[in-house]
Image (tube, grey):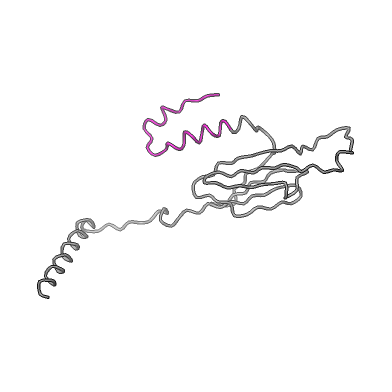
Amino acid sequence: MNVDFTPLFRTAIGFDRMASLLDQVARTEQGNLSYPPYNIEVEGDDKYKITLALAGFDKDDIEILTEPNLLTIRGKVREVKEEKNRQFLHRGIATRAFERKFQLADHVRVVGAHMDNGLLTVELVKEIPEAMKPRRIEIGSQSLLESSAEAAENAEARETSAHKVA
């Protein structure tokens, strides 16, 4: 399925990353539709948890990588020698290799991961830098740009007169 997002971006400024993100998500979902199954939970305003069902995998079989705005979880079961001698009438526990990618919003980072009873849990937190948080602006009686320009001129004049006196 191809979707053209061009009309959406004609009037949107600064959202150019959004088109590539939507395209990447569409391509990723086509490749790995359902394995391994996972949940994404919200645990507050800025905490998230991703849980993957990984029966048959050990923590040494899992690799978790983070890049800017991307979390990649890969798994590959190392072949056990004992398993070659086993015969199955039915084998329903999938232990095939996988790669699952999650797009992360800006300022979301992985803080930890643990494996318990065949469930891999990855904990994430969103930390907005102090400079990007909303702040209240006081309304003054004059322009700060003009007053800072006047202050710079006054300081320059004082320096000039100080040099003349010396």
Which quarter of the rendered picture does the N terminus lie within? Answer: top right
Picture coordinates of residue 32, whole percent (x, y)? 65, 33
Q: With respect to residue 43, does 98 lie above or below?
A: above
Q: Which residues are magenta?
A: 1-27
Picture coordinates of residue 107, whole percent (x, y)? 50, 50
Looking at the image, the residue that sits furthest to the bottom is 166
Picture coordinates of residue 145, whole percent (x, y)? 22, 56
Horizontal relation, residue 76 to residue 4: left or right? right
Picture coordinates of residue 66, whole percent (x, y)? 58, 47
Q: Residue at x 40, y 56 (%)?
A: 131
Residue 89 falls in which quadrant of the image?
top right
User: In the rendered structure, does residue 137 fall within the stretch colored magenta?
Assistant: no
Q: Residue at x 69, y 48 (%)?
A: 120
Which quarter of the rendered picture does the C terminus lie within? Answer: bottom left
Q: Closer to the camera, 144 or 31?
A: 31
Q: Closer to the camera, 102 or 7?
A: 102
Residue 85 falls in which quadrant of the image?
top right
